[in-house]
Amino acid sequence: MSLPNIAQTLTESAQRNPDMTAVVFTIGYQPDGNAIYSVLSFAELNALCDRYAHGLSRYGIGKGDRVLMLVPPGMQMIGVTFALVKIGAVPVVIDPGMKRAAYLRCVLDTQPTAFIGIPKAHLLRLLYPRVFRTVRHPVAMAPHGFLGAPALESLCEPQTAPFAAAEMDNNSEVAVAFTSGGTGIPKGVIFRQGMFSAQFDLLHDEVGIQPGEVDLPGLYSFALFGPALGLCEVFPDMDPTHPAALDPAKLVQTIQDHGVTNSFGSPIIWRKVAEYCLPRKIQLPGIRRILMAGAPVPPSLIESYTHILGDGEIYTPYGATEALPLTMISGTEILQETAALSAQGYGMCVGRPVSKATIRIIRITDETIPAWSNELCLPQGEIGEITAKGPMVTREYLNRPEQTAQAKIDQNGEVWHRMGDLGYFDDRGRLWFCGRKAHRVETTRGLVLPVPCEAIFNAHPAVFRTALVGVGEPGQQTPVLVVEPKPGHSPRGGAAQEQFRQELLALGALHQRTKGIDRVLFYHKGFPVDVRHNAKIDRLALGRWAAKKLKGI
């Protein structure tokens, strides 16, 4: 698919199906608990985008301007985003749940010329003028403006004239999205027109998403694909900065009310939905596919959906902000072929590469690799760092040359991205994920990897999840198993803890890769997790905690 401007796909959808519902938001609830929805058709959404595009363009926002956005989920968020893309401006998305210092560092990296946000966000301009010094065009999502920023609606006169979308080529910047910074500083990922075109092709051709389907976005940034693909986007009533806090009853009602056929979301979302549906024998037969990503998906969660979905399928795509998707595997294949191996410590199978993605496993090193060489590659079955290239892979980080050099390898102008993950290929061409490179544990007896080991201990019936961390200097680290028990199963007192510990060690003794793990610590509150998916375990933070516990601090 060659797109002159990805926003043009919205215009085309409006022309083909003007009256079809494009976007649905929950705006309240009736006394009986039923949801009240706000709805826009494709024609109405496109007209809203055109109105915003005219207003923001007259205000001085132009092609190539980076525009920082801190806009709550709603019609305005979708309208403003597509308006900016029509102009040729570059929306910048930073996780609103990020800590303030990290957020401000992201703003400095971006050097935005415009800032569209809620009043609370504009207070940051007053408190940190140096960080926001490049902002020339502030816009407030407020009825009467705020701190010198005019209200969005005041910029946009009522009109019906279409806005001519800016011409873009494959190298044109379309958006900037920041990584969550789970194993380092958050970095701005530059998305270009060609990358979006490749992702559209993959979602249509390999995932099978068709125009007219109904999508529920568990990660709001992915909702922007929906209108461009001709999908109806139904936004769940949830806090996007804290998906673990969602009310599954409300989400299930939304799915049933609108006939949702497709959804992408964190495993934590779908675990909560499963825990709600299973005891009530609720089924969701209209869903054709659920894509779970953001953290390893336990086979037990996939198995639970065999009782909830009809003919629908679970998929667990693998990728990152910098490269998505790279592989795909169905829940059926996991349950029938790979789950038993995962339970034995082989890692998590994430499937075969998608078309146009090339994936190689290279030797593990923390050094930069300026130029690609086939001599870097490891043979099938050997664990190393996962690298990828293809049209869905980004080329650089925004204003972060050092991090770009660490993550990218040049091959005659083509760019390989180092995923920062460890894994291997099996003899059937499937990729297996073994954990983050930054989380590897280097002992005197060799390399110990979190994901394969944790799966063995997670089989204990009283364990919710575990995290393997290393304490000490690399090469001489002590592997420590940190355990988060299931609610109501936390061992109290020395005798109970020792019995639990011995049961875990007995599990570990059954497998070669976990025999050397004899330090067990119990974490009596929820593990620290990432702000985006609420599912990726912060093993570095747990490692610092474990080091203090072992020292008796």
Image (spheres, helix red, strand yellow):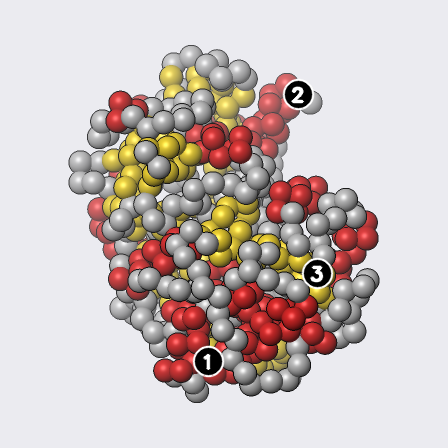
Kindly identify the residue that appears in the image at 48 percent across and 13 percent down. Answer: 476
Give residue 146's quadrant in the image.
bottom right
Task: Please tell me how crowded label 1 is: few (under 14), some (14-19), or many (20+) other residues with Cα within 10 Å.
Answer: many
Instruction: From the image, tell me which residue sits under label 1.
Output: 42
Instruction: From the image, tell me which residue sits under label 2.
Output: 552
Mark 2 vs mark 3: which is more N-terminal? 3
| Front residue of this view, candidates 33 and 433 | 433
Quadrant of the snapshot with the C terminus? top right
Nearer the camera: disc 3 or disc 1: 3
Mark 2 vs mark 1: which is more N-terminal? 1
Instruction: From the image, tell me which residue sits under label 3.
Output: 137
Rendered view: 21 above or below 528: below
Task: Please tell me how crowded label 3 is: few (under 14), some (14-19), or many (20+) other residues with Cα within 10 Å.
Answer: some
Q: Amino acid at mark 1?
A: Phe
Q: Amino acid at mark 2?
A: Gly
Rendered view: 399 above or below 82: above
Kindly identify the residue that appears in the image at 55 percent across and 60 percent down. Answer: 63
Residue 87 horizontal side relative to residue 158, left or right: left
Q: Marks 2 and 3, Cα distance to the nearest angstrom?
A: 54 Å
Instruction: Point out the residue furthest to the left here.
Output: 427
